[in-house]
Image: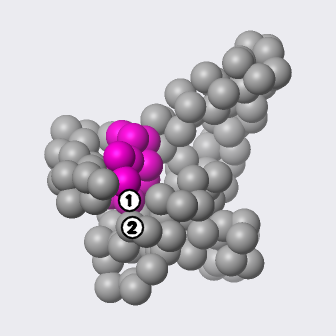
Amino acid sequence: MPGADCLAASRPLTVVSPLVLLEIEHVLTRNVNRETAYGVNDWLLAQERTGRVEIPEVSAAVVRLARRVQNRFVALRLDLTDATNVALAERYETADVLTLDRRDFRAVTPLTFHKAFRVLPDDL
């Protein structure tokens, strides 16, 4: 279908680290129940098949970069998930981060040319 590629390219892509899937499962299992946690992760995986969500591989190089982020911002005591999100934001050349960790992402500077992260949904 002509134009479909253009339309697909114009849709925003949501990148979800596999480490975030782990956190979703942990938090929802603790606060709601395991079935809900599985359901949310299954929904995200279904979105990945549509091309709306990308779940990238987190290679050793990404983890090394994340560890450098943790060391650079040592006073913040960033967990590996947040530091990996900073590293992935660099890979995808974005400053948009959907997070509940507002304090951390207000204090951390992106590894890209951006001056600060745009913390979503707060900064919409």
Q: Are marks 2 and 1 in contact (CB under 8 Å)?
A: yes
Q: Which residue is mark 1?
A: 86
94 vs 11, left or right, is: left
On screen, residue 118 above or below 13? below
Q: Quadrant of the N terminus?
A: bottom right
Instruction: Point out the stretch of residues depicted in magenta.
Output: 76-87
In the image: residue 25, left or right of residue 37: left
Is residue 56 at least partly visible in the picture?
no
Amino acid carrying mark 1 in the image: Val
Residue 88 picture location, percent across and down: 38, 57
Q: Which mark is residue 108?
A: 2
Q: Residues within 10 Å of mark 2 (few under 14, many from 20)?
A: many
Picture residue at 32% right of the left edge, 77% below the top: 112
- Whether residue 44 appears in this view of the structure is yes
Residue 4, x across and y down, in percent: 69, 71
Number of residue marks: 2
Real-space Cα separation, disc 2 to disc 1, in angstroms = 8 Å
What secondary structure is the magenta-colored segment mainly? Answer: helix
